[in-house]
Image (cartoon, grey):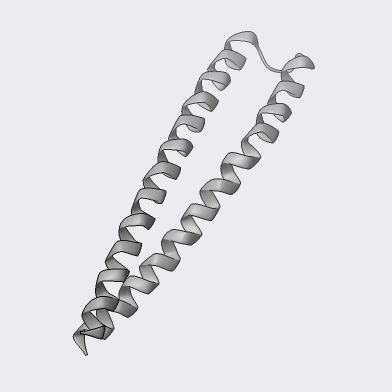
Amino acid sequence: MLLLLLLLLLLLVHGLLLLMLLRCIVLIMSEPLMCRRLADHCHLGTIHFRLRQRLNHELSLLRLLLWCRLVLLVCLQLLQLLMLRTMLLLLLL
């Protein structure tokens, strides 16, 4: 019974990790659109040069953090799948 509850908990965590992974992928895919919008404002001259440099720096840091988050979530998903497989094998024994 305890193994079954643990398996259900692992499935719930697995689903939540999948949702976080999909959200991270959507953020990475929409990031060029955000950069394009900022570039349009910069070309209109509404953003000062130093502010534009700072925004570019912060966008590159955000991009790096998003990719690190994506890699971490993929590793967590693989670990979760390994744990699920182990739990299923224990239940079958």
Kindly identify the residue that appears in the image at 76 percent across and 13 percent down.
Answer: 45
Q: Report the residue that reaches farthest toward the top.
A: 49
Looking at the rendering, which quadrant does residue 50 occupy?
top right
Looking at the rendering, which quadrant does residue 77 occupy?
bottom left
The x, y position of residue 51, in whole percent, is 59, 15
Whether residue 22 is situated above or below residue 32 in the rendered picture: below
Q: How many marks?
A: 0
The x, y position of residue 70, in whole percent, is 45, 44
Pick the residue in front: 11 or 39.
11
The x, y position of residue 54, in whole percent, is 53, 17
Pick the residue in front: 52 or 31.
31
Q: Report the residue that reaches farthest toward the front.
A: 93
Kindly identify the residue that appears in the image at 72 percent across and 27 percent down.
Answer: 36
Whether residue 42 is situated above or below residue 36 in the rendered picture: above
Q: Quadrant of the N terminus?
A: bottom left
Kindly identify the residue that appears in the image at 65 percent across and 12 percent down.
Answer: 48
Whether residue 69 is situated above or below residue 60 in the rendered picture: below
Q: Quadrant of the C terminus?
A: bottom left
The x, y position of residue 24, in whole percent, is 52, 47
Q: Is 24 displayed left or right of 39 in the figure?
A: left
